[in-house]
Image: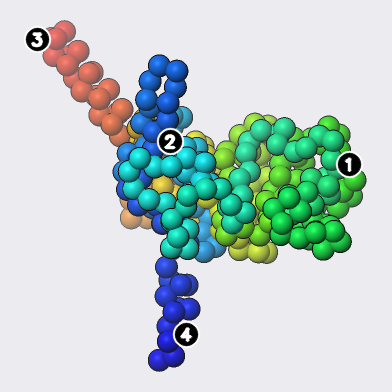
Amino acid sequence: MDKTHTTTQEQALAPLLDVQGVTLQYKTRDHLVTATYRVDFQVYRSDRYVLLGPSGCGKSTLLKAVGGYLHPVEGEVRLKGQKISKPGPDRVMVFQEFDQLLPWKTVKQNVTFALEASGKLKGKAAEEKAMHYIEKVNLAKFANAYPHTLSGGMKQRVAIARGMAMEPDILLMDEPFAALDALTRRKMQEELLQLWDETHFTVLFVTHSIPEAVKIGNRILLLSPHPGQVKAELNSSGDDAVDPKTGLRLSDRIHNLLFADEVEEAMKEDAEEKEATHG
């Protein structure tokens, strides 16, 4: 077999992102906090990979490590086989905050600026690329509008267009729809999936919403409460239908896996209370 062909096949089968035994810590004023403990997962090209868990389980901290903003105290994070040591244009972050856009620049200028500042494109080429992705998120009519004139959902679309225009290896999304009202959040989820259908980009998506994880992800990593450890990894078709084998919806199964320890502890306490009462 052709050696070049074999190498290409191996690259296609290899994980795009490989997180190996990663323990992450950060300092507060009074403490050294262990955010995650020996977390492992792999993200492949075109995955919609979701990190799901309760607040404080280290989801956003993991995203920072993938972004190159935080270094593990144990383990490694690799992108395309190379150890991540710093931020780069091959990883672009979309946050939940609406103020992530430059307020003195228009929609088109915000997207163009990212391309020019990173050195990816300049001038007319940058503008054309910017407009291509602005059209993808249905904001062409607002290309010359300033952020303060846009709704929260529209600002998030601009942030997504900016990230997509960079054409990164992986798009990092940190609860991007959490601050939106329920109807807008649902609409943004649908639009993100429609955009994925068109381009099949790779996304690492953080949420603490079980329904959002089921809808967005094709693979979902469940993390335990602080410090975050892997509890399970599940596949999702985006449909929360009842599984004929277990009789459970995926959302119910996820809930049971995430909160099994709490339920068990509550049942134990209840049994001890009854024994003390009737003993």
Separation of disc 1 and disc 2 at Cα?
Answer: 36 Å
> Could you tell me the amino acid type at mark 4?
Thr
> Could you tell me the amino acid type at mark 2?
Gly
Camera-side mark, 1 or 4: 4
Give me the residue at 61% from left, 63% from top.
Answer: 200
Look at the numbered discs 3 and 4 and tell me whether their residues touch, using CB distance below 8 Å. Answer: no
Camera-side mark, 2 or 4: 4
Separation of disc 1 and disc 4 at Cα?
Answer: 48 Å
Q: Residue 224 at what x, y percent from top left?
A: 35, 36
Residue to which mark 1 is pinned? 145
Give me the residue at 18% from left, 19% from top.
Answer: 271
3 or 4: tag closer to the N-terminus: 4
Separation of disc 1 and disc 3 at Cα?
Answer: 72 Å
Viewer-proximal residue among 250 and 226: 226
Residue to which mark 2 is pinned? 58
**Colour pattern of the rendering:** rainbow
Q: Residue furthest top?
A: 277
Q: Residue 279 shows which numbered tag?
A: 3
> Could you tell me the amino acid type at mark 1?
Ala
1 or 4: tag closer to the N-terminus: 4
Give me the residue at 47% from left, 63% from top.
Answer: 80
Residue to which mark 4 is pinned? 4
1 or 3: tag closer to the N-terminus: 1
Camera-side mark, 3 or 2: 2
Q: Residue 31 at what x, y percent from top left?
A: 38, 20
Q: Residue 64 at what x, y percent from top left?
A: 51, 41
Separation of disc 2 and disc 4 at Cα?
Answer: 40 Å
